[in-house]
Image (cartoon, rainbow, N blue to C red):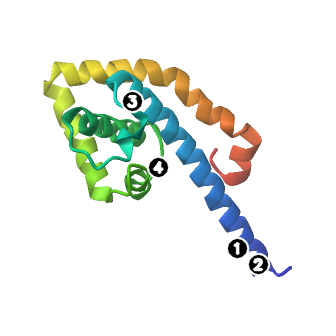
């Protein structure tokens, strides 16, 4: 097998592994957010503008951005094929509101409590060896 074919195969393998790893992290975050915000699991994919669902998506983007290395584009795709600018807007909104709105700050703290246990699930999905192999460490 030629060097280019090996490099392309490894590159594709790496991207597939990275996507699985990031999707697992986002799954854990969405589970925590949907549980604390009391919204259905499919609310992340929904086009609904119901306030509770919209806020849950905003919290989701906030936590994905602060706890992972997932790109804005990937975040938007995960959340119902939305544009990256929608994810940025949601993240910035939560950052702004958290400084002045006590309920938003409390909700962030509640989600953080649930998340601390759940993010280990994503890390367990990938062993240390796989993380080293694919360059996550």
Q: Quadrant of residue 7?
A: bottom right
Q: Quadrant of residue 43?
A: top left
Compared to residue 26, the image places residue 9 above or below, namely below
The reply, left or right, for residue 1 in relation to residue 67 is right
Q: Closer to the camera: disc 1 or disc 3?
A: 3
Report which residue position mark 1 lands on: 8
- Whether residues under marks 1 and 2 lie with C-beta atoms below 8 angstroms apart, the answer is yes
Task: Give percent across and percent down for residue 61.
Answer: 35, 42
Quadrant (top left/top right/bottom left/bottom right) for the N terminus? bottom right
Mark 2: secondary structure? helix
Compared to residue 8, the image places residue 117 above or below, namely above
Mark 3: secondary structure? helix
Structural distance between the alpha carbons of marks 1 and 4 = 22 Å
Report which residue position mark 4 lands on: 70
* Among numbered discs 4 and 2, the one appearing first in the sequence: 2
The residue depicted at 39 percent of the width and 29 percent of the height is 34
Structural distance between the alpha carbons of marks 4 and 3 = 19 Å
The residue depicted at 51 percent of the width and 38 percent of the height is 27
Compared to residue 59, the image places residue 109 above or below, namely above
Report which residue position mark 3 lands on: 34
Structural distance between the alpha carbons of marks 2 and 3 = 43 Å
Structural distance between the alpha carbons of marks 4 and 2 = 27 Å
Task: Give percent across and percent down for residue 49.
Answer: 21, 44
Residue 5: numbered disc = 2
Label 4: how many residues lie within 10 Å, few (<14), some (14-19) or many (20+)?
Answer: some
* Among numbered discs 4 and 3, the one appearing first in the sequence: 3
* Among numbered discs 2 and 3, the one appearing first in the sequence: 2
Label 3: how many residues lie within 10 Å, few (<14), some (14-19) or many (20+)?
Answer: many
């Amino acid at each position: 097998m030629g060097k280019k074919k090996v490099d392309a195969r490894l590159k594709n393998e790496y991207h597939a592994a990275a996507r699985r790893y990031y999707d697992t992290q986002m799954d854990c975050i969405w589970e925590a957010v949907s549980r604390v915000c009391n919204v259905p699991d499919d609310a992340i994919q929904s086009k609904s503008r119901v306030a509770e669902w919209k806020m849950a998506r905003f919290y989701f983007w906030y936590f994905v951005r602060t706890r992972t290395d997932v790109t804005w584009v990937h975040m938007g795709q995960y959340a119902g094929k939305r544009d990256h600018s929608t994810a940025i807007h949601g993240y910035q909104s939560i950052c702004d509101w958290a400084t002045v709105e006590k309920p938003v700050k409390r909700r962030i703290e509640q989600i953080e409590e649930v998340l601390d246990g759940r993010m280990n699930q994503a890390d367990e999905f990938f062993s240390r060896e796989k993380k080293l192999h694919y360059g996550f460490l």
